[in-house]
Image (cartoon, rainbow, N blue to C red):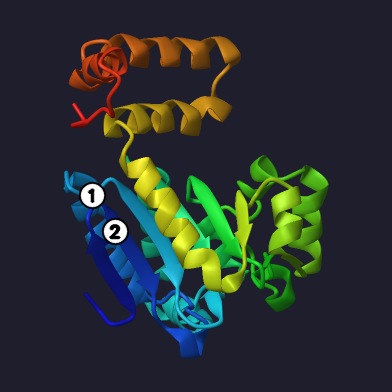
Amino acid sequence: MSDELLVEITGTVATLTLNRPKAMNALNLAVLGKLEQILPELATNQDVRVVVLTGTGPAFCAGADLKEVLGGQQLSPGEQDFLGRAAVVFNLLREFPKPVIAALNGVTMAGGLEIAMCADIVLAAESAKIGDAHSNFGVYPGAGGAAILPRLVPLNVAMYLLYTGKTLSAAQMYQYGFVNEVHPDDQLTDAVNKLAQQLSTKSPIVLQRMKQVARHTADKTREDALLHEQVMLREHLRSYDIQEGLRAFSEKRAPVFKGY
């Protein structure tokens, strides 16, 4: 892996760290290319049950490397540009079959906010500043800023962030429901690791199926969403993990889930 994206697998947890601190961890083609490569590998790695995405230095991610975005205008028709690769990577994250935790260690803006929106759970350091910022540079969001953010926070909060380009604190975004937990800066890593380890003890197939239904419920009627859930339940009743969970309960022991 490139030094610009650090990959560390510890037990059942894979941590992906954006490592361009001098560029505020701005996303470039090299980082996107490595994410496009590693995410499918982690998705099929049976030993990995949780993925954590974070950054080094004072920023989680300040967005896209604008030099590379502008450079895409010089590419030949059909040649994959920055926006095309970013769309692929962001979709891989949204549809990743395992829990994804975003650990916002610092400044989170524009594409950084959009990549954080791909996560299932968001933890943040107290010092983290979170915003959209596209409007500050006359740039239009292309990975969920306008399309997804209003689904995750109240509409007027989303419009405030989109229109003004200002940032809000981690505590404010916690109040609006975007951030799940806020921790002192020096305790964020421990809190994320503790949560990741907790999720790793759950049935992988239960979490995967919950994610499949929950991620798509907004696109369905209530009746269709409930039907989707029922279909998943019928499939799950034939799994090893449900039998193991029930046996462990009756035997008063911790279950050992295998993910099938």
Q: Residue at x 26, y 27 (%)?
A: 255
Where's residue 216, x and y in %? 48, 30
Label 1 residue SS:
loop
Name the amino acid, label 2: Ala
Q: Earlier in the sequence, mark 1 or mark 2?
A: 2
Q: Is residue 142 in view from this perspective? A: no
The answer, for residue 71, to whether it is visible in the render is yes
Residue at point 54% right, 21% down?
A: 220
Position in image of residue 97 (x %, y %): 32, 40
Give whichever of 61, 218 is nearer the camera: 61
Q: Quadrant of the N terminus?
A: bottom left
Residue 48 - label: 1
6 left or right of 226 in image: left
Which residue is at the front of the view, 34 or 139? Answer: 34
State the mark number for residue 14. Answer: 2
Instruction: Using the image, determine if residue 66 lies above or below residue 242.
Output: below
> What amino acid is at disc 1?
Val
Dot 2 lies on which element? strand
Quarter-of-image position of residue 257: top left
Q: Residue at x 46, y 57 (%)?
A: 192
The image shows residue 36, relative to residue 58, as above or below, that is above
Looking at the picture, does residue 22 appear above or below residue 256?
Answer: below
Residue 61: where, in percent of width, then height?
52, 72
